[in-house]
């Protein structure tokens, strides 16, 4: 179900644009139907008012919380079961700079196949609809405040552009999220850069870089678009200057693999409008990578600062609750599989 379908559905019940926005605000922001400056019974068309509880239940029913795993750092990892029995993850993030964040998924699985990512091992299973993406936010807001949404969960957002940008525009209008607090994460794709530049709601950009070496990037991200790190940074920097939001360059630190590229990082990022987020790898059973020693990571940050590169050391949220993307889903699938439940075909009688 897409947001455009819902808007059409509401219009068929007599809703004008302002009615549609009000209804979506109530659902997305977890506002009780009894609250608001104007009572809904005096504001909405009668047919819409009567259908509203059923419709909201239908939208929220696109997924349910299967497992909640609170972390010691204030995060909470959610495994969400979809109507077809598939599952995705969302993560309530610890508060940072007055923002209560939520990391949402955009696909079941992922086609990029990053060698250090659990999600990439499953391949792409299916796309999420824009309403399934938004339902993650609606559910999370029943648990706590969410005023920042990052599209960094399962999936590659640039491979599901229509649904992702429909969700971004809805969150930036009816969802009450400031545009700079919407973060579109991508491994880099020409179509994504074009869509970002043309978007009505322009989110901040997070670019998964991970290395300065083109050959190594192909090895680590085998099915990412064939753009070199230099080309990616040039496109990301152009968008940052257009939107006014600095790029967040994402770099998963892998011991002995990409944790000693100081000179190359300086050459690539010097003078760019952005910040480099260095994220020590969360160990995953079965993957051949290790987390660098803490002093190696801190030393790299220190030397980059001395050479004029704005860099931050970020720990992935929820390391004590399968912190890497896809780890909770993989464990639960192994212990208590969430099976695909096929619905019987409708009767044609």
Image (tube, rainbow, N blue to C red):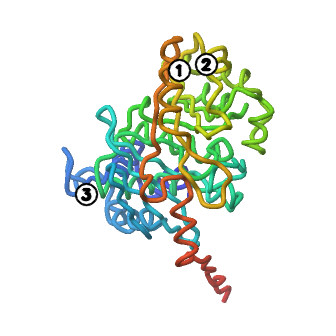
Q: Position of residue 21 (x, y in %)?
A: 38, 44
Callout 3 secondary element: loop
Residue 273 found in image quarter? top right
Compared with 204, 267 (above or below) is: above
* Disc ID at residue 274: 1
Q: Are marks 3 and 2 in contact (CB under 8 Å)?
A: no
Distance between the Cα atoms at labels 3 and 1? 41 Å
Q: Which residue is mark 2?
A: 237
The residue at 53%/49% (across/down) is 282
Is residue 281 toward the left or the right of residue 70 in the image?
right
- Label whose residue precedes the other's in the sequence (3 or 2): 3
Q: Are marks 1 and 2 in contact (CB under 8 Å)?
A: yes
Q: Which residue is mark 3?
A: 33
Compared with 274, 63 (above or below) is: below
Callout 1 secondary element: strand
| Residue neighbourhood size for the residue with mark 1, other residues' Cα within 10 Å, grouped as few (<14), some (14–19), many (≥20) | many
| Residue neighbourhood size for the residue with mark 2, other residues' Cα within 10 Å, grouped as few (<14), some (14–19), many (≥20) | many
Considering the image in quadrants, where does the N terminus appear? bottom right
Observer able to see residue 201: no
Please state which of residues 25 and 45 is positioned toward the viewer in this rendering: 25
- The single residue placed furthest to the bottom in the displayed view is 349
The residue at 70%/49% (across/down) is 115
Is residue 212 toward the left or the right of residue 129 in the image?
right
Q: Position of residue 201 (x, y in %)?
A: 50, 31
Please state which of residues 104 and 46 is positioned toward the viewer in this rendering: 104
Callout 2 secondary element: helix
The residue at 55%/53% (across/down) is 325
- Label whose residue precedes the other's in the sequence (3 or 1): 3
Observer-side mark, 3 or 1, equals 1
Please state which of residues 26 and 43 is positioned toward the viewer in this rendering: 26
């Amino acid at each position: 179900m897409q947001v455009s379908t819902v808007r059409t559905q509401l219009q068929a019940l007599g809703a004008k644009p302002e009615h549609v926005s009000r209804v979506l605000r109530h659902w997305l922001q977890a506002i009780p139907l009894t609250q608001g400056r104007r009572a809904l019974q005096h504001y909405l068309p009668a047919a819409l008012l009567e259908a509203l509880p059923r419709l909201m239940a239908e939208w929220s029913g696109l997924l349910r919380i299967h497992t909640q795993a609170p972390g010691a750092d204030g995060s909470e990892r959610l495994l969400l079961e979809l109507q077809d029995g598939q599952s995705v993850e969302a993560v309530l993030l610890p508060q940072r700079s007055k923002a209560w964040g939520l990391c949402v998924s955009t696909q079941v699985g992922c086609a990029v196949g990053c060698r250090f990512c659990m999600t990439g091992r499953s391949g792409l299973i299916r796309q999420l609809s824009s309403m399934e993406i938004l339902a993650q936010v609606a559910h999370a807001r029943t648990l706590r405040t969410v005023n920042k949404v990052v599209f960094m969960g399962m999936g590659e957002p640039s491979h599901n552009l229509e649904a992702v940008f429909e969700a971004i525009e809805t969150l930036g209008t009816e969802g009450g999220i400031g545009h700079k607090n919407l973060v579109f994460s991508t491994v880099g794709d020409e179509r994504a850069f074009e869509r970002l530049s043309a978007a009505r709601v322009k989110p901040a950009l997070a670019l998964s870089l991970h290395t300065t070496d083109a050959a190594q990037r192909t090895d680590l991200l085998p099915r990412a678009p064939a753009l070199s790190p230099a080309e990616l940074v040039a496109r990301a920097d152009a968008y940052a200057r257009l939107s006014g939001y600095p790029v967040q360059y994402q770099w998963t630190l892998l011991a002995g693999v990409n944790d000693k590229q100081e000179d190359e990082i300086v050459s690539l990022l010097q003078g760019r409008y952005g910040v480099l987020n260095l994220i020590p790898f969360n160990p995953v059973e079965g993957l051949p990578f290790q987390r660098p020693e803490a002093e190696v990571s801190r030393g790299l940050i220190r030397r980059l600062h001395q050479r004029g590169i704005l860099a931050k050391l970020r720990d992935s949220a929820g390391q004590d609750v399968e912190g890497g993307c896809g780890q909770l889903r993989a464990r639960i699938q192994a212990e208590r599989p969430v099976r695909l439940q096929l619905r019987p075909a409708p009767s044609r009688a």
